[in-house]
Image (spheres, rainbow, N blue to C red):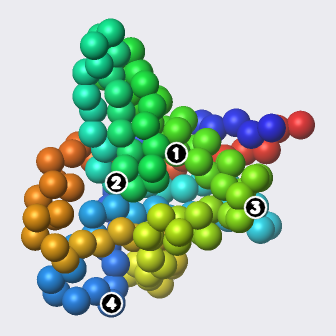
Amino acid sequence: MFICSLQLCCILATVKGLKSMDTIEANIKITREKDKHVSVSVNMPIWNKRTEDGNLKVMIPFLGIDTIASNEADAESAVGEAICSFCIVSDKFGRGIEKELQELGWTLMLDDAGDPVWGYSFTEPVLDRIVNTGESYVNDHLELESCD
């Protein structure tokens, strides 16, 4: 069993080695201790849409996830829980977080400190404008803990 605890911060990873016209629209940094995933730092656009029944449909397109929230405050928790669930399920039942991200189009890059970070970048101007219409979800420390 895993428990996710959320601590929200606004931090952006800058990534080396990109051409000047490339921009990073989303990034995920995975932290491990003793070969276990402990936390992920996340920055990616999300979209909210009010449903007919008054709930918020929250879309996390770069992970292929949609979730439902009752209001804006609940949406923040719902996104964190959805990303945490993605990580846990990828590790426990999939081929690992890194392989699952790679299959979704994410690319492994290095940040300024030389640490690996998964990025999703765009060079197409139309796609870049579409991505910029979403709100950014930023979580600098989404913990994945093992529970006995």
The residue beneath circle 4 is 17
**Dot 1 or dot 4, earlier in sequence:** 4
List x then y, in percent, for residue 7.
Answer: 49, 40
Assign a secondary structure to mark 4. Answer: loop
Q: Are marks 3 and 2 in contact (CB under 8 Å)?
A: no
Nearer the camera: disc 1 or disc 4:
1
Query: What residue appears at the point 39 percent right and 56 percent down from the top-left corner?
Result: 62
**Amino acid on which disc 3 is placed:** Lys
Nearer the camera: disc 3 or disc 2:
2
Instruction: Identify whether 11 is placed above or below 84.
Output: below
The residue beneath circle 2 is 44
| Circle number at residue 36 | 3
**Dot 3 or dot 2, earlier in sequence:** 3
The residue beneath circle 1 is 83
**Amino acid on which disc 1 is placed:** Ile
Task: Using a 10 Å C-alpha cutoff, classify the residue at mark 3 as few (fewer than 14 neighbours), some (14 to 19) or many (20 or more).
Answer: few
List x then y, in percent, for residue 11.
Answer: 34, 56
Mark 3 to mark 1 CA distance (whole Å): 17 Å
Instruction: Identify whether 27 is placed above or below 92.
Output: below
